[in-house]
Amino acid sequence: MGQMGRPGLSAAQKADLWQRWKQGQSLSEIGRALGKHAGSIHGVLSANGGFMPPVRTRSRWALTLAEREEISRGLATACSIRQIAATLGHAPSTVSREIHRHGGAPAYRAAEADTQAWARTRRPKPCRLATVPLLQQMVASKLALEWSPAQVAGWLKLECPDQDTMRVSHETIYRSLFIQA
């Protein structure tokens, strides 16, 4: 889905924004420097509590683009998963999971896999209750009957055993209730 309204700030503009904020400039001054309304600047600052968010980095355990390219080369030369894993120094299950997660051996592309993996690490993730309307309706109906979140979560597990999208933990239900309140 495309972005609605005016485009946001680029990464360079956000870095400049945080630098200017750190120097003590006002919202109006920062807005003028970046060609944005002070309200837009306030939105970025307030979303992070006025503190610069940490720079995203990859986990040291995650596969790198170079390792993914090695997997792709191994698949192209018909190497076994165990051979590829031995070359990389990773467990065969890690290599197998990586291949299957990104379309299987015939469709595996290192650059696409790396981009998808990086996108999946974004936090916070959207809540399943916000993204699955049927689940939201089922949970709301049971809460209206004064069921506890633990009872709702247990009932969903029994009611929809084969549908992972229809599962939600009681902690998620509590969290969504707390945010709504």
Image: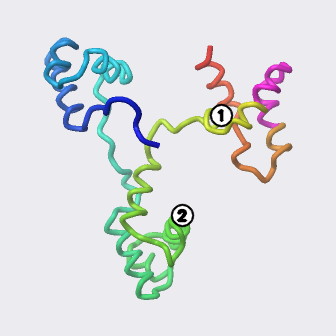
* Quarter of the figure with residue 45: top left
The total of numbered circles placed on residues is 2
Where residue 159 sits: x, y (%)? 85, 43
**From what the image shows, is residue 147 above or below residue 124?**
above
Neighbor class of circle 2 (other Cα within 10 Å; few <14, some 14-19, many 20+) is few
Inter-mark Cα distance, 2 to 1: 24 Å
- Colouring rule applied to residues: rainbow
Tell me the kind of residue under disc 1: Leu
* Quarter of the figure with residue 6: top left
Where residue 94 sits: x, y (%)? 50, 67
Q: Secondary structure at mark 1?
A: helix
Residue at image point 41% right, 75% down? 71
- Between residues 85 and 109, which one lies in front from this camera angle? 109
Residues in magenta, as a range? 139-154
Q: Is residue 105 left or right of residue 6?
A: right
As for residue 150 lying within the magenta part, the answer is yes
Where residue 181 sits: x, y (%)? 62, 13
- Between residues 25 and 94, which one lies in front from this camera angle? 25
As for residue 44 lying within the magenta part, the answer is no
**From what the image shows, is residue 99 above or below residue 118?**
below
Q: Earlier in the sequence, mark 2 or mark 1?
A: 2
Where residue 131 sits: x, y (%)? 61, 38
Q: Which mark is residue 101?
A: 2
Q: Main secondary structure of the magenta part?
A: helix
Q: Is residue 69 left or right of residue 103?
A: left
Tell me the kind of residue under disc 2: Arg
Residue at image point 76% right, 26% down? 140
> Residue tagged by mark 1?
129
Q: Secondary structure at mark 2?
A: helix
Q: Which mark is residue 165?
A: none
